Amino acid sequence: MAQEIEYKFLVKGDFRPFVTQKHEIVQAYLSTDPNRTVRIRIQDEKGYINIKGAAKISGLMRYEWEKEIPLNEARELMELRESGLVEKTRHLVPAGNGLKFEVDEFHGDNAGLLLAEIELPTADTSFEKPDWLGEDVTGNPSFYSAMLSKNPYKNWREITE
């Protein structure tokens, strides 16, 4: 089974000078059950289906499976979504040792939210935290994209500011 090991942070500073690549992403969820999410993603005109299992207690690790699917099928499946779309620009920032931060700049109902994620090969892999990283929100379900599709940032942003 493939395991995703990932930390998630709010972004508090200017990461843009370090960006090496970016992607436009639209996501829709066919299931937002906390024990398993089923996501359809269109990223730069390519379609994907993704299944994630329940997060472990720390929120750091969970099962993940993903496959590329034809773009037209991804668009059709998005019509079956159970909640709103999640739209974002993903900025890639090198983190050293072959690692990278994925900084998501959300649009639409989640505009104003900036989240950085770093995926690690093992739970004990160390990494440098740049100055622009803010609070660690790993394991906080409010910041999972599946939750943002149901309860967008515009509904609760005042609480975090």
Image (cartoon, grey):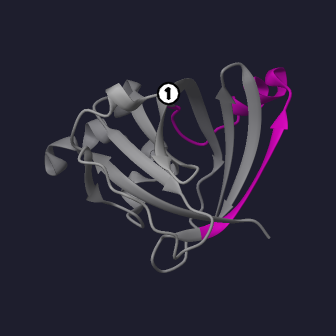
Any part of residue 35 in sight? no
Is 64 positioned to the left or the right of 137 in the image?
right
Q: Is residue 22 magenta?
A: no
Q: Nearer the viewer, residue 158 or 132?
A: 132
Residue 149 drawn at (x, y percent):
48, 42
**Quadrant that contains the C terminus:** top left
What residue appears at the point 70 percent right and 36 percent down from the top-left corner?
80
Amino acid bearing label 1 = Thr
Q: Nearer the viewer, residue 112 or 18?
A: 18
Residue 15 drawn at (x, y percent):
32, 34
Please state the total of marks drawn on the protein image. 1
What residue appears at the point 40 percent right and 64 percent down from the top-left corner?
138
User: Mark 1 = which residue?
Assistant: 20
Q: Is residue 63 magenta?
A: yes
- Image quadrant assignment for residue 112: top left
Question: Is 10 located above or below residue 63 in the figure?
Answer: above
Residue 140 drawn at (x, y percent):
37, 64
- Image quadrant assignment for residue 33: bottom right
Number of residues whose C-alpha sits closer than 10 Å to that of mark 1, classed few (under 14), some (14–19) or many (20 or more)? few
Q: Which residues are magenta?
A: 62-86
What residue appears at the point 61 percent right and 37 percent down from the top-left corner?
28
| Outermost residue toward the front in this view | 97
Is 158 positioned to the left or the right of 24 in the image?
left
